[in-house]
Amino acid sequence: MFLHTKKALSLLAILIPAAALWAQSSSGELPRPATMEQCVQYAIEHNISINQAQMNTELAKVDKTDAIGAFLPSAGLSSNYNFSKGFSFDANTNQRTNREQQTMSLSVSTQLNLFNGLKDLNSLRRARLEYASQRYNSEKILNDVSLNVVSAYISILAALEYQKVAQSQYELSKMQVERLETLYKAGKNSLGDLYEVQATLARDEQALVAANNQVDLAYLSLKQLLALDLTYDLQIDTLGYDQVSLSPLMSTSTVEIYRSAEANLPEMRKARNDIEVSRRSLAIARGSYLPTLSASYGWGDSFIFDYLNTSTGAPISIGEQWDNNSRHSIGVSLSIPIFNRLSTYNAVSRSKINLEVARLNLQQAQLELQQSVEKAYSDAVSSYKSYLAAVKAVESSREALRYATEKFEVEAISSFDYETAKNLLLKSQGDMLSAKYDYLFKVKLLEFYQTQEITY
């Protein structure tokens, strides 16, 4: 009996956490703690800017469907009922009558553009290109939000480590104050030394408050990107970011990274696509120089209620009137533009200018991308070197502080010298953390340029 109970409890221990995780993921909530990948995925699903971009993509899709519809004929059905009393004109006899009369008519018409300077064809091609541009723009916004989330996540990691350093410095100063208070009460130390370490403690407490505030601000920034309520208890996973090593990407040339980014990044594909959009717009504008040709067809019928034959006085049925009054029409319309007050000429001129602007926009985007790649690469190399140097500086400063602490406790050095050693360690730790997390983000940025994916 005990064995079965033990097995049941073991099974529950497995199923309950699994059920909790399933419920958490199905409800769309972030786990605690949340990994970088989970934060990025959550932002993709909930960020307002991404949702707005997706709606704009849907609008572009509707515009494309609208352009397809331009190739179809237009058709309409109309009906009319009329009641008249007094003198009126009888359309069937071409005579004036003086009586109450009720008439009913029905007509169907359709029209089809046969040729309009290829405007419909070029409009469809442009709509397809604009739809592609909007999709590229949506992808760019998604990438921007993802990178912003990564940056905010890394900022929290850095702020948490700064907080640990500030807390450590505060605890160290607090211990020294307690020690000197004991020595002062025993008459083994001066009041001036006690005041100095108390002042140091106050400064360290102020630095700790600033570090705590920086953590709160970093979390606030990430919450805003994730569209979370400000009261939401967001926690991030800090595991796996202790060690920093040189990325294999550092052996790749910036030219290779740039070529990959230029060929595949959505903003670059959009810039190239926008040139084709401008070409289609120019073709549409030039189409206004050409004649337009359209065909139309119409059918109509009418009848009069209680209509009488004027010769015999016998009533004529609605069916007979329907057969007699039916009419058909077929027409072809040709319109040749001659002069429209320079409207077409100016439209073509504007389209040519917009085409040149699109080409310049591509060149500008290529230049900015090249500069971004080179800067990210240079910053990554510099940050890694700074990190290695800072690690050595931290080790040396830690040993120097240990030595200064021993000297200070036996009153071999002043509190000023002790505080100087402590501040050197604090500065070295700050430099190391700054270089570490700057390098971490720049490497992720370079990896994104190279592969168009964010690694976690």
Image (cartoon, grey):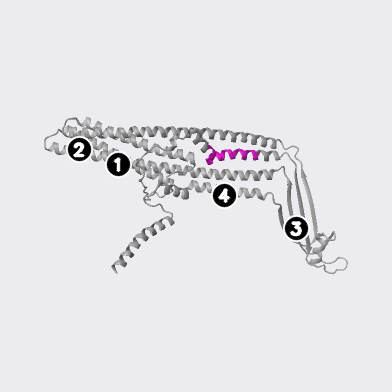
Residue 234 magenta-drawn? Answer: no
Residue 318 falls left or right of residue 48? right
Q: Do the residues labelled 2 and 1 touch (CB within 8 Å)?
A: no
Mark 3 or mark 4, earlier in chain:
4
Q: Are marks 4 and 2 in contact (CB under 8 Å)?
A: no
Q: Quadrant of residue 404?
A: top left
Q: In the rendered image, which quarter contains the C terminus?
A: top left
Give the Cα distance between marks 1 and 3: 84 Å
Q: Residue furthest right?
A: 311
Mark 1: amino acid: Lys
Q: Which of 104 and 272 is in front in this view?
A: 272
How many residues crowd around disc 2 within 10 Å: few (fewer than 14), some, or many (20 or more)? many
Q: Is 8 above or below relative to 393?
A: below
Q: Which residue in the protein does label 4 denote?
A: 58
Residue 227 falls left or right of residue 190? right
The residue drawn where x is 55% and y is 45% is: 135
Of tags 3 and 4, the one toward the viewer is 4
How many residues crowd around disc 3 within 10 Å: few (fewer than 14), some, or many (20 or more)? some
Give the magenta-colored segment's residue range. 262-281
Q: Which residue in the protein does label 2 denote?
A: 176
How many residues crowd around disc 4 within 10 Å: few (fewer than 14), some, or many (20 or more)? some
Residue 386 falls left or right of residue 189? right
The residue drawn where x is 38% and y is 34% is: 384
